[in-house]
Image (spheres, helix red, strand yellow):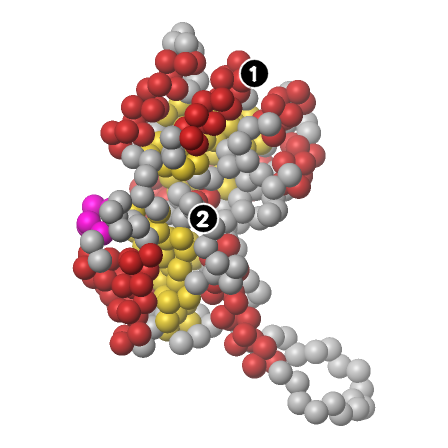
Amino acid sequence: MKAPLIGWLVAAILGAALALTGQRLLQPGPAEPAPTAEPPPAPPPPPAPADPASARALAVKALVEAGVPHGAIRHGVYPLRGPGRAPAETLPLVAFDCPADGGCAPVVEALDAAAVPAGLTLVGPVGGDRPGRPIFRALSDGERPALALRAQPAGPRLTVIVGDVGRSPALVDAALALDPDVTLAVAADGTDSAQVARRLAEAGREVLAHLPLTADGGSADGLGPATARLVERVPGAVGAAAPSGGALLSSGPHAAALLGALGDEGLFFVDRPPTSGSVAGPTARARGVRATAATHDLDADPATPIEARLKAIEVSLVLDGHAVVTIGADPAALAALQPWLETLRHRRVRLLRASEIVR
C-alpha cells in the first residue's frame, strides 16, 4: 500500500461515511439537455468536525469501565483526509493500550455500546482490522467526525527508523531488505532524494524526510520555508525526522517554525530522545502537530558493540513495553538489525511503523 496508515483513518473510516454523504448531496436528477455548457458546480465542503469534548469524555469513561487504566490512555491529534480538507486539518485522538487479559475486542464493544445512547456512531475501517496491528475507530456525530480512536494490542511494541537513507546507493538496497515495517527516512538534501523516495514508496515502505538542518541553520523566520523546500525533495513522505543540530530544536522560535511548516503539509514529526534538550514535543502539542520522540539512538554510543546496544533495547521492551529506535544507514548496523528483528518477531514483539504511534 503506497500510503501507509498515516491519513488512513479518515480516508478509510470517516472518508467512507463522508463519501456516502457527498453522493447523496450530489446525486443528479433526471437528465435534461443543457442549453449551454457550464462548468459543473463545486462539491459542497465536507462536514466540519463536531465538538469533541463530550465524545472524548464518553470515550474515556467507557475505556476505564472496560478495564483500561487511566495511565494507558493518551491524547493527541489525527489528520483529516479527503476532498475539501486542508493539509493541516486534524481531529482529536484518544489512543489507548488494550488490557492484556481481555484484548481489544471487549473494549471496542464497550465503546460501541456507550456511543449509541449518546447519539454517536462508532465507525470502523471499510477493509476491516489488520491482524496484530493497531485498531482504528472514529466516533461520529451524525455526518460530522467527532473523535479518532486508536487501540494498541497488548504486548511489547517496537518502532525502528533508519535515517539518512539515500546517501549511498548500495545502502538503499540494504534498507529495502529490512523488515517491511521498518520506517525509512530519506536524506532530504541528497542528490537523488526524490528518486530514492519514489523507489521506497513504490515498494510499499513508509517514508520520512530526514532533515539536514543544523544548529547554525539561520533565523527562525527562514527555517519554515527551508523546511518546506526540503520536504518537497522527498515525495511521498508522511512525516519528518529530527535534524542533527543539537541547539536548533532547543530554541522555541526555531522549533515553532519547523513544526509549523510540517503542520501546514499535514506531516508528523519524529524527534530525538528527550535527553537532547529539544522543545519540539511541547511545541508540537501546542501547535496541533502529531509527534513522537525516539527512546533510543543506536548511533549515540558507537564504541559499544551493536549487539550490546540492541540488548539494551530488549531490556526497555521488557520494562517499558515499547521503544522507538533511530539508527543511521550504516552497513554493519543494518546487517545486525534484520536478524535481531526476526528474533523479536518470534518473541511476539509488534513492529509498528512511525505513523502508527505518533499522536
Quarter where residue 254 is shown:
top left
Q: Is residue 233 left or right of residue 32?
A: left
Write the residue at 25% across / 29% down: 319
**Figure check: 130 above or below 144:** above
Quarter where residue 349 is shown:
top left
In the picture, the disc for residue 131 is 2
Camera-side residue: 254 or 326?
326
Q: Amino acid at mark 1?
A: Pro
Q: Which residue is mark 1?
A: 331
Describe the element under mark 1 as helix, strand or loop: helix
**Figure check: 343 above or below 109:** above
The chief SS type of the magenta part is: helix
Quarter where residue 303 is shown:
top left
Magenta span: 68-72
**What is the x, y in percent for residue 219?**
46, 33
Cβ atoms at labels 1 and 2 below 8 Å apart: no
Write the residue at 37% across / 44% down: 284
**What is the x, y in percent for residue 56?**
28, 62
Which residue sits furthest top? 303
Q: Is residue 81 magenta?
A: no
Q: Amino acid at mark 2?
A: Pro
Describe the element under mark 2 as helix, strand or loop: loop
Q: Can the viewer see residue 17 in this picture?
A: yes
Work out whether mark 1 precedes mark 2 in sequence or the reverse, and give the earlier one.
Answer: 2
Write the residue at 47% across / 27% down: 342
Decide: few, some or many residues near mark 2? Use Cα within 10 Å; few <14, some 14-19, many ≥20. few
Query: Label 1 to label 2, Cα distance in Å?
Result: 32 Å
Camera-side residue: 279 or 318?
318
**What is the x, y in percent for residue 345?**
43, 32
